[in-house]
Image: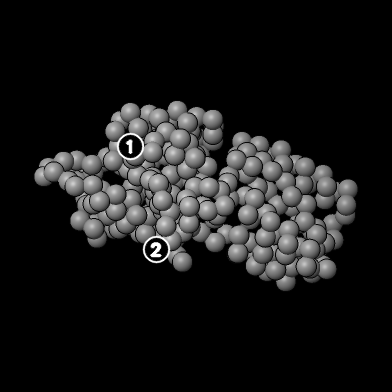
Amino acid sequence: MKRRDLITLLGGAAAWPLRARAQQAGTLRRIGFLLAAVPAAGMNPDDLGPGFTQGMRELGYVEGKDFVVEWRSAEGQYERLTDLAAELVRLKVDVIVAGSPVAVRPAQQATTTIPIVMGYSTDPVGNGFVASLARPGGNTTGLAGSSDDSAPKQLELLATIVPNLSRVAILTNPYNPNSPAVMKSVWSAAEKSRSSRCAGGSAQPTANRGCFCCVGQAKRSGGNGGE
């Protein structure tokens, strides 16, 4: 699925709770966006791509006339998500959009009544966000991705491009609920391949430089071939 199509779906998903709640004429609805890393200052719906605005328009919602967006971001400081989610609840937003999987749980802890829309999640059932894909239950719905299925394919493509591939460093975010499912799939694919073995690394967004330095040191100590 193209990114534009995904964002259009997200716009439709965010609009669903607005329609589900009976609207009074002239009422301006509030959509709360809870972001994990992207700075919220100066954000607007078009920053997500034109698909979001398009999806809302297709359902009859125009920004400024029918809805406004309250942007909140932890800017990489994930411990702030709990307070930011609580702030959106105090603002009495009509729906909370969790722009990252790491924002879903804080939103759920903040409210059991305001609808929550997941921007995407690789394993929402396994992470306990919803009861099932067919019947989510509770106040949470949204989009489920398939990065756990695509990650092994990426490893296969890398092995095709790089002759005699012997070692791959994988950088993951330990705070991201998607990471365990993705890593499990990658490790499984690596075990089946005789030409590659993986060294997994974990990092917060602010620690990426240090992780790349460690990868470079491992490369120098292990040789240059097939890495």
Which numbered disc flags the more N-terminal residue, 1 or 2? Answer: 2
Q: Quadrant of residue 156?
A: bottom right
* Residue 215 percent location from the top left of the image: 77, 47
- Visible in this render: residue 158? no
* Front position in the image: 45 or 123: 123
Q: Amino acid at mark 1?
A: Glu
As displayed, is residue 206 above or below residue 166?
Answer: above
Instruction: Identify the element where label 1 is drawn.
Output: strand
> In the image, 165: left or right of 15?
right
* Front position in the image: 62 or 105: 105
- Visible in this render: residue 66? yes
As displayed, is residue 79 above or below residue 118?
Answer: above
Residue receiving disc 2: 5
Residue receiving disc 1: 70
Query: Residue at coordinates 38% horizontally, 45% vertically from top-left?
Result: 139
* Residue 113 percent location from the top left of the image: 34, 39
> In the image, 172: left or right of 221?
left
Query: Residue at coordinates 82% horizontally, 62% vertically from top-left?
Result: 166
* Front position in the image: 121 or 211: 121
Q: Amino acid at mark 2?
A: Asp
Instruction: Identify the element where label 2 is drawn.
Output: helix
Please tell me the numbered disc located at residue 190: none
Query: Residue at coordinates 57% horizontally, 59% vertically from top-left?
Result: 147
* Residue 222 percent location from the top left of the image: 88, 52
> In the image, 208: left or right of 129?
right
